[in-house]
Image: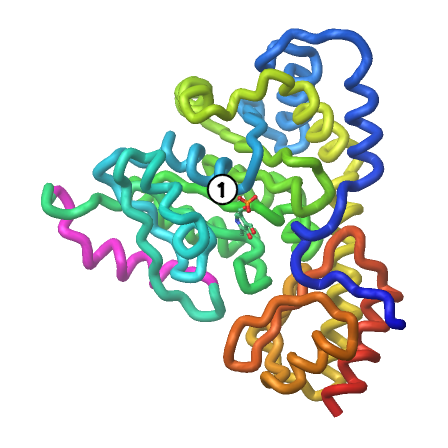
């Protein structure tokens, strides 16, 4: 019998052993509750060093949706709109959380080739708005997702160019970095280069998909916003009493490049998988640049992959399947997945 290969989601992977060890480290003795502990204090310094920004402040939260919605609520007024790509998670997959927490702000998904926004897309949208007209939501935030929901990756220069357009229109800038480590590895750049150094003012820092236990974070680079976030988080139930267990994981995650090493494994496994599937002549929806691949296999092959190959994956309709690698996926598994797909796709 074939052993199953997990390719549904990096959310389906377990926890990284290093982060489980960090949890144990934080488990001796008592500590001040609600973020008053030494780990949470240290986390702020670690983030300031990693992002090379003296005002970086980290707010641990329990999910990527919480990081996005609560972070955006501090940037967008109730009458504002958050401009993002039409495929972005905040627009398609968060059940209006951004609108709820902004108190009525609109999430505006707009088109952009290759699952990414380009400066002209944003300019065109901003030009189409009735500025100052109280009958219309006022664009207030530009939110980018990197890697995108289709596994492509913005380059630092592309983020800078988009942030410049946002500044021209007085929009704040937000990055959904649910898989930020995978994007940094793909870009081979520093964390600052793709975020605050490129004009991003707030970031959802994903860690769960890359090995953490129920801990993502908001990273904000603006002291005025940092202050109000504290209250917004508390009102939404996101100030964990035992925050030390979130903070200790984030410290370990960001220290000595652990987050990048974990993401390197995911991206390397994806490279093996995508090179193999390309050599079978399969067509990709987008070129995978991090750890997600959407590939046309046809409905019949997709069914056989599920029934005969012990592969776990998502079907997206129209014969497209989604394959995602994680820190846990080995290159051996990726080769084996290609071999199994070849056996039914030939
Ligand atoms: C790009 C992106 N942003 C945000 C999220 C939200 O994360 P969560 O499911 O933890 O709320 C996801 C989850 O898949 C995601 O893919």
Instruction: Tell me the quarter of the image containing the N terminus.
Output: bottom right
Kindly identify the residue that appears in the image at 44 percent across and 42 percent down. 174
Question: Residue 72 vs residue 168: left or right?
Answer: right
Q: How many numbered dots are placed on residues in this image?
A: 1
Q: Is residue 226 visible?
A: no
Point 83% across, 79% down: residue: 339
Q: Position of residue 131 (x, y in %)?
A: 15, 46
Residue 57 position by quadrant? top right
Residue hosting label 1? 65
Q: Up-down: is 225 above or below 308?
A: above
Q: Residues within 10 Å of mark 1 (few under 14, many from 20)?
A: many
Question: Is residue 129 part of the magenta span, yes or no?
Answer: yes
Front residue of 207 and 153? 207
Q: In the picture, residue 219 is in which quadrant?
A: top right
Of residue 67 and residue 126, the one placed in the foreground of this image is 67
Asked if residue 306 is among those painted magenta in the image, a careful observer would answer no
Q: Position of residue 41 (x, y in %)?
A: 65, 15
Callout 1 secondary element: helix
Segment tinted magenta in the rendering: 116-132
């Amino acid at each position: 019998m074939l052993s199953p290969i997990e390719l549904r989601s990096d959310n389906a992977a377990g926890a990284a052993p290093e982060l489980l060890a960090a949890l144990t480290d934080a488990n001796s003795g008592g500590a001040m509750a609600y973020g008053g502990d030494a780990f949470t204090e240290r986390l702020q310094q670690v983030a300031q060093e990693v992002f090379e920004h003296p005002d970086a402040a980290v707010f641990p939260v329990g999910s990527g949706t919480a990081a996005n919605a609560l972070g955006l609520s501090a940037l967008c007024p109730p009458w504002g709109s958050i401009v993002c790509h039409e495929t972005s998670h905040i627009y398609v997959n968060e059940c209006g959380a951004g609108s709820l927490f902004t108190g009525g702000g609109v999430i505006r998904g707009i088109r952009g080739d290759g699952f990414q926004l380009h400066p002209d897309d944003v300019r065109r949208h901003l030009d189409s708005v009735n500025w100052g007209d109280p009958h219309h939501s006022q664009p207030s935030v530009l939110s980018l997702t990197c890697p995108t929901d289709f596994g492509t990756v913005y380059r630092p220069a592309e983020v800078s160019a988009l942030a410049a357009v946002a500044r021209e229109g007085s929009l704040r800038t937000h990055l959904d970095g649910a898989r930020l480590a995978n994007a940094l590895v793909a870009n081979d750049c520093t964390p600052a280069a793709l975020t605050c150094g490129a004009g991003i003012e707030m970031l959802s820092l994903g860690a769960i998909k890359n090995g953490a236990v129920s801990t993502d974070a908001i990273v904000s680079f603006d002291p005025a916003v940092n202050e109000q976030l504290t209250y917004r988080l508390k009102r939404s139930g996101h100030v964990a009493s035992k925050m030390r267990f979130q903070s200790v994981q984030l410290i370990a995650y960001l220290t000595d490049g652990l987050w990048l090493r974990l993401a390197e494994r995911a991206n390397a496994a994806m490279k093996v998988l995508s090179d193999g599937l390309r050599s079978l002549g399969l067509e990709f929806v987008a070129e995978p640049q991090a750890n997600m691949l959407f590939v046309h296999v046809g409905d019949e092959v997709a069914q056989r992959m599920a029934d005969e190959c012990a592969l776990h994956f998502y079907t997206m309709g129209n014969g497209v399947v989604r394959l995602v690698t994680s820190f846990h996926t080995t290159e051996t598994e990726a080769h084996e997945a290609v071999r199994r797909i070849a056996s039914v796709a030939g």
